[in-house]
Each structure stands twice: as structure tokens, then as C-alpha cells.
Image (spheres, rainbow, N blue to C red):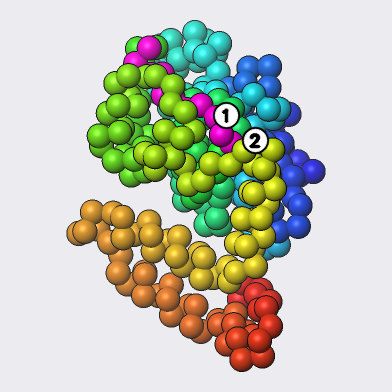
Amino acid sequence: MIPSPTERMIAEKEGAIGWMTFNNPERRNAVSVDMWEAIPVLLSRFEEDPEIRVVVLKGAGDRAFVAGADISQFEQQRSTPEGIARYEEIGEAAWRRLATFPKPTIAMIRGYCMGGGMAIAACCDLRIASDNSRFAIPAAKLGLGYRAGGVKALVDLVGPAFAREILFTARHFTAEEAQGMGLVNRVVSEADLEPYVRSYCETIAANAPLTIFAAKRTISEVTKASGSIDHDLCQRLVAACFESEDYAEGRRAFLEKRPPVFRGR
């Protein structure tokens, strides 16, 4: 167990996998302020551990991944201009840290994935869901504004037409609908969800960390507006791969017909 600022967020290390669990099952893992604040802290601890190659986000129990922000706190935390600004600042810091986290991230989605839960999942690199999952952004039913960063992440995944449908209707979408929109990468049975995610983690962890890091950063760059792409950075990332010990190991392993052992350097 990795120390956490709050009992509502659990961080664990299992080999090359870092597990981050939203632990508020009595509220379907709705995210409270202390949980938002813990996300950047725990991600930093995962980043600092070179043995961790991939991080999985999941919800406690079997009812929900994350059923949005904890609405019970809105009257106290989001009822004044100052409170709203502070809450948005905390949430923005969590989303930004997750979106820019250098290692691969997977949202393992079982049950409800709503509102802020969808924003969290959208910030992950991959989303793998059980076939009984349900997705929605109910902002229009609550009268609250949805931050631009969250809208952009949604549009980047599903495109503007589906983003409009999700935000305008505020209705629930099935896992099959979510996959059809591009919101999730894979849908599997509930019984197969964790084994499937573990298998993906093993595949990713066996690959070259510097190559994955370069790919993640380059994808972020090339999806920016054309005038703001840092081409020099992309080239440096490629050069770092070719200059690495892992590249030499990959060549040797190919010639020797054995699995490579990458060390991230």
C-alpha cells in the first residue's frame, strides 16, 4: 500500500502496475474535494517509481467507476463565486496532472461513469469498460457549466457531434453506445474486465518505456493546432529512443529470437 492523503483514495503497487482506486462506494465513488486533491499526489508517487510502467484507475466495489463529483458538497463548496473558483482550481489541477502524466494510464470502468468520472476517464490514455457500464454527463440537469478542458477532452475522443448529444441530452449511454462513439477502447464482460486489463498492462509493461513515453508526448503534440506543434521536441524524443540502451537491447533480442528486457534507459 502506498501512503495516501485520504482514505477515500487507495494507491497500491503490484509489480509494474500502479492501482489507484476511488474509494467512496457508499456514494458510488463520487469524488469529494479531498479525493480531487489526492489525485496529483498519488500520480507523483507512481511517476517517481521506475518499476511502475502503467497506472490503472478503478472504482471500489462493483457499482461504479466514478459517479461524478460529490454533489452533497456543492452547497458548501460550490455555492459562492469564491467557492466555485476554488473547486474548479482543485479539479483542474487533478485533470491536468492526469492528462499530462508521462506513463500510460488505463481507466478500468465498471458500472456508472458519470460527469466528473467521464472527465477522469477521458484524461486516461485507454478506457476499458464492462458491458454493464453506463455513461453520462448530467451537467444540463444540474444547471452547472462544464469546463472548457473537459469539453475539449470529450470532443477529442468522440468528435463534436457526439459531444453535443452527450452534453445536450444528459442521458445515459450504454457501453455499446460508448464504444460506437469512440468513448471507450474496448468492452468486455464484467467477469473478464480485470483479467483483460491486467493482460493489457502486461503487454504495455513489457514494451520499451522510452518508446511509449515518446509516443505519448508526440501524440499530444500532433493533436494540437498545427501552428503550436513542437516539432523539435518530437525529434528529440525520437533521438532519445535511438540513443538508448533499450534500443540496443531490442535489436539484440530480435537477432537472438528472445523477448527483450527493457529497463527504460
Residue 146 horizontal/vertical position (percent) = 35, 25
Q: Check if mark 2's residue and mark 1's residue have beta carbons within 8 Å.
A: yes
Quickly name the residue at label 2: 190
Q: Amino acid at mark 1?
A: Asn
Comes first in the chain, label 2 or label 1: 1
- The residue drawn where x is 66% and y is 86% is 257
Picture quarter with the C terminus:
bottom right
Q: Is residue 54 above or below residue 265?
A: above
**Left-right relation of 167 to 244:** left
Quickly name the residue at label 1: 132
Tell me if residue 28 can be seen.
Answer: yes
Q: Is residue 260 above or below residue 2?
A: below
- The residue drawn where x is 55% and y is 38% is 129
**Left-right relation of 128 to 157:** right
Assign a secondary structure to mark 1: loop
Which is more toward the observer, 82 or 170?
170
Mark 2 to mark 1: distance in Å?
Answer: 7 Å
Which is more toward the observer, 212 or 34?
212
Residue 135 forms part of the magenta stretch:
yes
Q: Which residues are magenta?
A: 130-141
